[in-house]
Image: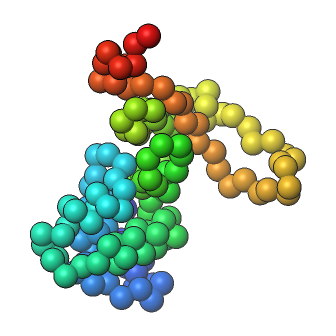
Amino acid sequence: MDERSFRQQCKTRGIRLTEQRLAIYRALSTAKDHPSTDTVYRRIKNRFPGISFDTVNRTMLTLVDMGLARLVEGSGGGRCFDPIMEPHHHLRCLKCHAIIDFHNESYNRLRIPRKLPQGFRALGKIVVLEGYCKKCGTSKETKS
């Protein structure tokens, strides 16, 4: 979503658009990685020295609620955010916790079972493959 659309969506939802919120949106929407709240906080802290971690965290969660980002959770590191909303999947390194996007049409076609445990209602799917990234997979520590 471009910045103009973001501004309009904030207006429609009654969300006051501050310079800090705009900076958080820009930091997330232009990220080439899957930043955590802490990463976004560090990226904008110099420009907004008085901004709190809580403000960044709440804004990141608001961006998820607005459908502008996805929450990426899993084993290992803390929760991260993904600005890419098109169907894709993730590779997650068990050592450095890097999250790498990948596309696979057969995974996109996986069907969600009609009956899920405890009446769970699935709204989407994402496949996460865990292993070691190129850097960590060649380190002496991971070889046995």
In the rendered image of this protein, does residue 53 appear above or below residue 119? below
Q: Residue at x 24, y 71 (%)?
A: 23
Q: Which quarter of the rendering shows the N terminus? A: bottom left
The answer to which of 130 and 84 lies nearer the viewer is 130
Residue 112 appears in which quarter of the rendering? top right
Answer whether residue 3 is visible to the viewer in this image: no
Residue at the spot x=40%, y=80% of the render?
10
The residue at the point 15 percent across, 77 percent down is 49
Q: Quarter of the image holding residue 20?
A: bottom left
Relative side of 113 to 28, left or right: right
Height in image: 69 above or below 139?
below
- The location of residue 50, given as percent across then percent down, is 19, 82
Tell me if 126 is positioned left or right of 39 in this view.
Answer: right
Query: Which residue appears at 32% of the width and 73% of the height?
Result: 53
For this view, does 9 lie left or right of residue 3? right
Residue 49 position (above or below residue 93): below
Residue furthest out toward the top: 144
Q: Camera-side residue: 11 or 82?
A: 82
The quadrant the C terminus occupies is top left
The mark total stands at 0
Specify the color scheme: rainbow
Q: Nearer the viewer, residue 5 or 141?
A: 141
The picture quadrant where one finds residue 110 is top right
Residue 29 picture location, percent across and down: 32, 58
- The answer to whether residue 65 is visible is yes
Say above or below: 77 vs 43. Answer: above
- Can you give x and y, in whole percent of width and height, for residue 118 in the image? 86, 55
- Residue extending farthest left: 46
Q: Position of residue 116 (x, y in %)?
A: 83, 48
